[in-house]
Amino acid sequence: MIDMNYVASEVQSILAMLDGGELPEVYDYLSGITEEDGSVDTAPFTIANTLVGLDRPLAFPGFLIGFIEEMFRLEISEGNDDAMNDLGAQYCCGNRGFEQSFDKAVAYYRMAAEKGNRPAQENLGYCHYYGRVGRPDFEKAFHCFALGAFDGHLVSLYKIGDMYLNGLYVPKNEKEAFRIYVRCMETMTQEAEGRVAGPVLLRLGGMFLDGVGTEEDAKSALVCFQKAESFLYDMVMAGDDMYRRSLEGAIDGQAKARRKLAEQLPESSWSY
């Protein structure tokens, strides 16, 4: 049983140290969940999960990071697998003042994955795919992604597309990769859009541009790159700096598509 008196005292301590002018959303949120008598009824997981999304993309001071970690750990002690996964994600990304530790991230992901947590299995797949701890293991990555894709997790699905595109663990099959990316866009949800649409559209743009897995189509490539730029811009602005190179790729892809389209224009004898 989580001691909510302890949670309330921790919230009060953080409020006393916070500068409401520097982190107004955080200050207003913690003030808002505090009752007149100083008590707090909001679950620690809700507090931690809410705080990591506030005042983006500003970095948090160390005392606030420590508080968020503590709120996650209180829930983890009660067996909350979502808290395990979300704390692991903070360590994996290392954004906004959190320590970046792939060892800690994988430990929490595994803890949650053993409880059947699909996002954790997906995140663990990423760690195997990129070799965050040790060498890349594409077989383990594929099996982790397959679990998520089976339940409709679009990040898992498009990463399986990447594996077919590049011939990692599975035989290289560009047409299958293209079909998977198209399927991602066809089944896109508003919830997944912010994480998935940009990367998938970037891949589709490249495939249309070069005729990989589909017919070459510079106009479709341009449209995909333009849409990808918008989504990727939002991701980078929200603090996902790892997508900055993807954003640059979407912008560069538009220039390449426009050059191809210009070459396809018919010659004109009309005089200006």
Image: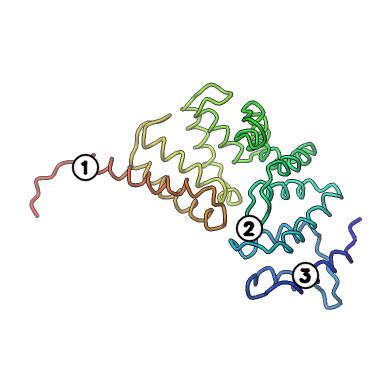
Viewer-side label of 1, 3: 3
Q: Which residue is mark 1?
A: 265
Q: 10 Å neighbourhood of mark 1: few (<14), some, or many (≥20)?
A: few
Instruction: Using the rendered view, name the quadrant where residue 262 is placed.
Output: top left
Q: Tell which circle, 1 or 3, labels the residue nearer the N-terminal end.
A: 3
The secondary structure type at the circle numbered 1 is: loop
Q: Name the amino acid, label 3.
A: Ile
Vertical arrangement, residue 26 with respect to residue 123, above or below? below
Viewer-side label of 3, 2: 2
Residue 56, x across and y down, in percent: 60, 62
Q: Name the amino acid, label 2.
A: Arg
Q: Residue at left 51%, top 42%?
A: 185
Residue 182 vs residue 36, the one in the foreground:
36
Residue 142, x across and y down, in percent: 63, 29
Q: Residue at left 70%, top 60%?
A: 50
Q: Which residue is mark 3?
A: 33
Vertical arrangement, residue 110 with respect to residue 45, above or below? above
Viewer-side label of 2, 1: 2
Q: Tell which circle, 2 or 1, labels the residue nearer the N-terminal end.
A: 2
Q: Name the amino acid, label 1.
A: Leu
Q: Residue at left 80%, top 68%?
A: 11
Q: Which residue is mark 2?
A: 96
Are dots 1 and 3 in contact, CB under 8 Å? no
The secondary structure type at the circle numbered 2 is: loop
